[in-house]
Amino acid sequence: MKKIVPIRGGKRVGAGRKSGTGKFGEKTTLIRIPESQTAVISNILEAYAKRKIQEISNVVSIDLVNKALTKTKIPLFEHKVPAGLPSAVDDHVEKRMDLNDYLIREADTTFFVRIKGASMDNAGIHDDDVVIVDRSQEASIGDIVLASLDGEFTVKTLAKNKNGSPRLLPANEAFSPIEVLEGVQFEIWGVVTGAVRKFK
Amino acid sequence: MKKIVPIRGGKRVGAGRKSGTGKFGEKTTLIRIPESQTAVISNILEAYAKRKIQEISNVVSIDLVNKALTKTKIPLFEHKVPAGLPSAVDDHVEKRMDLNDYLIREADTTFFVRIKGASMDNAGIHDDDVVIVDRSQEASIGDIVLASLDGEFTVKTLAKNKNGSPRLLPANEAFSPIEVLEGVQFEIWGVVTGAVRKFK
DNA sequence: TCATTTGATTATTGTAACAATAATCAAATG
DNA sequence: CATTTGATTATTGTTACAATAATCAAATGA
């Protein structure tokens, strides 16, 4: 027995998917890619499709800690700044702080890394900031770390894929995560324990 | 008339082009590339074929997103210094730093203030950061300053109205500028010259 | 004998063809 | 008037294909 199919159709002029509705928003061509590089290229294209910035290095320079650190105890006001004239020579301010003490746990295993770019903006690490990296600390998932990929240094949040391979997350939606692919020389140099910025 | 073709042939077992004799030396797959990026990808592949670069992953920073991404390779610990020949690179690597030297100009006129809230987020000053305030510096328009209004302390960007009266600008759209009205006790305590933050 | 020619064989590589999916439109429906 | 339904067209990954390139060995000829 035949099913009665109600007729709905007819001409549909102008119908159909519109041009440029693909994930790239433009036409594509086929290119032959060596098999060992398909993963890399696919990653790049993924980032491109999402209009994200694919950036690895955001490190300008790496400096070591001075051999002999200075100690300068300076008043710290946590809540209310008292009226009057707070100063370092004042003895009676309740709390004093030394920057080296505050930010550096162990001088021997610490170094400074100057950051460029906006890829870690949402983590409060901005262009031209200097971050403090401690090599002695074990990096955990979620930590901000200094890592190198084939010799390029980057500061990113450490994450892990379902398959266990590491992933480096920028803290800025405009940037795409960095996948640590098979065969790439990858190393974690330390955990970012602090950041400093100079305004003036 | 038929041409007489001399017979030369016969079985040619084991003949034929050998696998891996293509320009990449390996198998390939077809990938669809957006047209605007084909030139870039072709260039990468050309270089890869010629082995000018060993790993294509080094070149991810290629201008896919129309942003020139320069990669910085920093010779760090693995860098071998030729004895007796100090170079700029070596100086750079050997550079050492002290936080007090870097952030504090004059200890006697400097103090720290811990910031609460998000009103200066866009200036890179976040909740729980410690800012460095220098009382000895003259505050200019555009500086981030520690100011007091009727005894309330605040860190804001210093601006000026057309009529000359000062104005304190938060760096966060969710907050409104503070007008310094007539009769309000207003004082600038110093200029914010830096900020530090502890992550871990 | 041995270098060269010739045809057989097989991989590469760019393009074309294809099929499954996705997006979009408008007539028909309720 | 919102929803359903089928028509239409682009996207996208895969397969097919044809021209080229590489390689081998039999046949040739100096």
Image (cartoon, coloured by chain):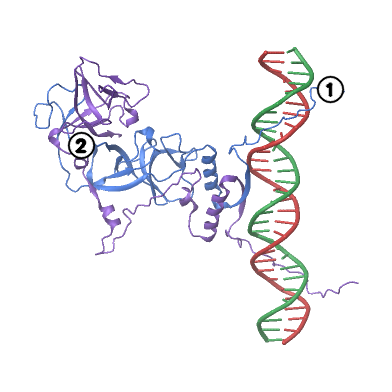
Chain colours: A blue, B purple, C green, D red
Residue A183: give its label.
none
Please report, as a chain letter, where disc 2 is located: A
Nearer to us in this view, A81 or B57: A81
Which residue is rendered at x = 55% and y = 57% of the image? B46
Q: Is residue A187 left or right of residue A68?
A: right
Say whether mark 2 and mark 1 are on the same chain: yes
Kind of residue indicated by mark 2: Leu
Residue denoted by label 2: A99
Q: Is residue A7 left or right of residue B135?
A: right
Please report, as a chain letter, where disc 1 is located: A
Q: Secondary structure at mark 1?
A: loop
Upstream in sequence: badge 1 or badge 2: 1
Across and down, in percent, residue A65 comes to 23, 46
Across and down, in percent, residue B171 comes to 33, 27
Quadrant the C terminus of chain B occupies: top left
Residue denoted by label 1: A3
Which residue is rendered at x = 22% and y = 26% of the image? B146
Which residue is rendered at x = 58% and y = 57% of the image? B26
Work out whether residue B45 can be spotted. Answer: yes
Q: Which of the 4 image quadrants contains residue A200?
A: top left
Which residue is rendered at x = 35% and y = 30% of the image? B122
Nearer to us in this view, A116 or D24: A116
Residues marked 1 and 2 touching at CB (< 8 Å): no
Quadrant the N terminus of chain B occupies: bottom right
Which residue is farthest front? B163
Across and down, in percent, residue D17 comes to 75, 53
Cα distance in 3D space between marks 1 and 2: 83 Å
Q: Is residue C26 left or right of residue B44?
A: right
Kind of residue indicated by mark 1: Lys
CA neighbours of label 1 inside 10 A, class few (<14), some (14 to 19), many (20+):
few
Q: Which of the 4 image quadrants contains residue A74?
A: top left
Q: Mark 1 or 2, which is nearer the eye?
A: 2
